[in-house]
Image (tube, coloured by chain):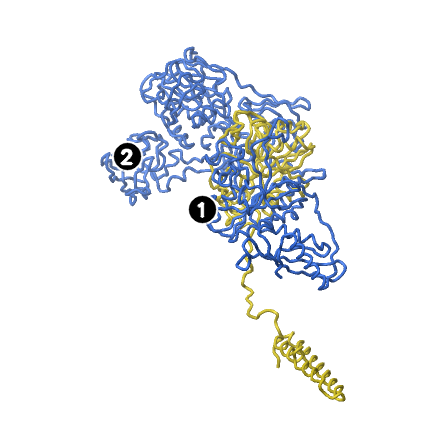
Chain colours: A yellow, B blue
Amino acid sequence: MVETLDDLDGVSRRILGRRGVMKDIQRAIGALDVAEKPRVGRLVQETTERIEMAVDAAKERLAGQTRPIDPLFDPTVPGPDMLAGGLHPIVQTMYDLNDAFEALNFEVYSGPEISSELYEFDNMNFPDEHPARESMDTYWLAETSGALGAERLCLRPHLTGASVRYMQTHEPPHRFVYPGRVYRNESTDARHERAFFQYEALITERHLPFAAGKLLVSTILSTVFGTDVRVRMRTGYFPFVEPGFEIDMECQVCQGRGCRLCKGIGWLEIMPGGVPHPNVLRHGGLDPNEWTGFYINIGLDRLVMMRYGIDDVRLFNSGDIRFLEQFK
Amino acid sequence: MLISLDWLTEFVRLPTDLDSSALAHELTLRTVEVERIENLGDSIPEDVVVGRVLDGAGTNNDAHLVSVETGDGQMVEAWAHEKLNPSAFVAVAMSGIGGDKRQSRPVICSPADLNLGMLWYGEAAHSTLVFGTGGSGPVVGREPLLGSKIAPLLGWDDTVIEIDNKSLTNRPDLWSHYGIARELAAIYSAEFIELPSASFDSVSASSNLLDLVDPSLCRHIAILDIARRDGPQPVTPFQVRSRLARVGQRSVGFYADITNYVMFGIGQPSHAYDRAKVALPLSVRYGIHEDERALLSGDRAHIGPTTPVIADSNHAVAVAGVAGSVDTQVTDESEAVLVELANLDPRAVRRSTLELQTRTEASARFEKGLDTQGVTRAAGYIVHLLQHYDQGGSIVGYQERVVAATQPQVIDTTLSFLNDRMGTELEAERVAELLNPLGFVTRSEGARLVIAAPTWRSTGDVSIPNDILEEVSRMIGYDNLPPSAPTFTVRHSGRDPLYALERRVREFLAFRAHVQEVLTYPWASDRYLDALGLSRQPMLTIEGPPSPDRRHLRPSLLPNLLAAVEGNLSHSNRFAIFELGSVYLGGERKPLTIADERLPALPRRVGAVFVGDSLSTEFRRAAAAVTGLRRAGWIQHLELKEDGDADSWGDSVAALEVRSADRVVGRIAAIDLPRLLDIQTNQGVVAFEIELSAFTCDSYRPNMYEPTSTFPSTSIDLSMTLSNDISWASIAAAASEVEVRLVKRVEFVDEFRGDSIRDGQRSITLRLHLGAPDRTLLASDKVLVRDAIAEHLRARFAAVIRA
């Protein structure tokens, strides 16, 4: 009894193949008497057909029994090594937020990373002697040393300067977000970086009560944390807003009960915001008697640290794939 | 800034059931951020109690045991530091003091033992803490109860809140207990207690105390001339010392303590000089003589023509607004004292602190811009305190000069403006109720609201209607404003094409090419710039760089990517990373938003590095990734060409240029890491960098439908040997020129060089994918195509067909 398709194939070739037994018999018919040839020929033909039918039947039988894959195959052996690949965790968060704001009909805008004192400070209502203007806080370009205003250039220390660029070049009302990296000349440690991401949004409208600005806040936090997060608005001071706010979120580690992260207070300072200062609106080409608005600005590095429990901000710029590949 | 809740009670009567957490919460929401609450009593161990010495035997030099009564008839043997008077009330640590060799027994404590040394100055901090009179150590003026805790006797049962200084930058009036008390009075509708002040009526005005006052430096100054009738300067009252210590200020002597008490109490800095060491009159001016002075802040100040100083007739006696000089300080022997109170230009003080690289409690306040009327208020308060605490001293002279007084700001606004922005319906009376406790005077004139700010809020803090809006809304509480949803007009919101391209590129590289995104700094190290030969091009430099070798802004993404590769090679031998971001180019600048502002070129690029065992494999991965960008990025023109730029970064042979139409926009090249960076590695390294802003993209998915054939397709392989000089791109292009109707695609299969192949040649195997839209190809079709292409390649490249 033939047990495998391979064996059957061999048997079939030996009997039915071009050099098989039946071919030999067919060739031998030629030597027979003429009277015998038809009878023997029919017999050979019938025999051949019966053998072919038997081979087909055997094929059918064996096809149902034979596995196409080696029974010793080990399915737990891993496939070819494929590199992980992925987006930087801050970029992931930025895109998540962009998607959320685009769904609210906001535009995504980008300002230049090198900007001028005019846009970063003068237009932003920073006093002439504000500490942030000094080199200890801002990376000024050496090529523009001694220049002022539009001619004094720096790596942007914040995103807010870009808001005036947008207002100057787009018709109001405005609704836009403008994420990006900013640069500050300060010492680094586990909580401080010289280069970090901010995410800023601005609405300008003719009538916009402060409380409406909470929409921006809740959009950001629910996008990042996947759930509604309690927030509180409190007074804060920034030259480019009046009134200015600090916005705190309920500590997500202790759910507001107080822990080390929130210094026992139950709240974490998460983002500043406020109503654009009248001088900022004027620089943007809007009449502050007619227009108002609402800014929010959030540090993405800190938000992502909180979201994933990252304990050292410097990891973001480390280029270390052991850290980065953890974020899918 | 630290605020003592006990000190606040001098200026405000808060609800008796108010706890510190609730106070901190309300203060945070409405005025300034409270970062920390500390109950000072918690810092003193529970078992430190009042005891009375029963025998005073022993010496001043050696620790010895004395008998101490600690209440309820209990007696213990306790270690003493020094010889003690019998009946002296002392602080006894019943379980000893941590780390002390005598810790197994009770110890009679010094202030320093209890970390309370700030309450006493000099040796007293290390002498035994003795309560009541008759002790040899510091005296606390209350009759103690045996066995009771010592914190209340020291004022250490207080609670201190720490306020984030950043939240105070625009509020010079809040840098004191008095200012915070006024806010709390307004928040809780509590009684605000006006500052006690003494009259100057009996003091004769002097004319010899002040000389030149530079109006660019000083807007108001007053000098108090104090004579002492007898003896050394008095001991600072314990309550003053205790309060100062609670907010972090060590006691340093009576007059300095009084000036500090006034500064922390009401926010106006002042300074006391030994009158005998000062050659009157005093001036406020910039330095004239080159001079170096030791300051009481512990710094040495180089005085020059840009240094604002308080000067006597001979020298600078203080760096104005920062610190006085050591050689004019008041000592125990001082018989007469001058107290100077000034209102100084905040910018001058700030510049001075930057030059000196020092910042003091006084300069922190001056830098915010103080109310000039604070000088007069503080002078009256100092005189009040001296009358109260310095029985041996008297004010013998006073001179004041007002250069430019702070004027109250008057803001003209409307109720409708406030209500519109807050979403409220307030009446004018309610606005007045909210503002008046803060010192504002509100007047309603029809639809108008005319509001006068107090001088302490008129220093730049309050000047426009939005400031009034802030005051009213914070007093209501932002979270108490009516909830409101914004109403938008939906309109088309376009996407920046470059932003859209960047996202598609990032997601393609990350999720389809399996490359990990990294972010690096905008500056690059000279080491990597030099290695890549990028230092030859014009670069931008920053002032105050993170390190001297990182002063250049990156003109390419590759230097920092190579740095990241070097870091990752210590733990990985196969990986791929990319970065997408701006590079910063020196050279020509162009206007972006307005004509006056010309910015450097900041093209957006994507760069990547592939690291693996085989250079050729990594090169092909890199090339495949770049080729894939065209489809994934909706890029209209992107192609790879053999590279002709031998001067560019990376290898000159293993390189391809990336082109968009007729422009070179990037490069793929092998990197010889061991040679460039002098490091040991056998890994193949290939990089690419492409300028994304150079591409033109479709604004929608550029998909085209082509009917699929219902007939099967087939393929044939073709192997040939030909010269090494002939690139695969040329072979593929040539193979595609023949039988165009049937050849759908030419695929690279393999290449081979070895013993069976002649020098200077290689064997190439290609696969021709064939198909026809209207029929199944016959074996004869395949033979036809194969022969035609073989003949074409033979003719073009002298290729010898192998099979």
x, y percentage for residue B80?
27, 38
Q: Is residue B649 left or right of residue A215?
A: left
Q: Is residue A98 left or right of residue B15?
A: right
Task: Tell which subunit mark 2 falls on.
Answer: B
Q: Which residue is mark 2?
A: B87
Q: Nearer the viewer, residue B646 or B288?
A: B646
Task: Tell which subunit mark 1 falls on.
Answer: B
Kindly report the distance in space between the C-alpha atoms of the residues bearing marks 2 and 1.
78 Å
The quarter holding residue A64 reads bottom right
The quarter holding residue B157 reads top left
* B70 in relation to B407, above or below: below
* B38 in relation to B219, above or below: below
Q: Nearer the viewer, residue B217 or B84?
A: B217
Residue drawn at (63%, 77%), measured in percent from left and top? Answer: A8
The quarter holding residue B756 reads bottom right
Residue B679: numbered disc: 1
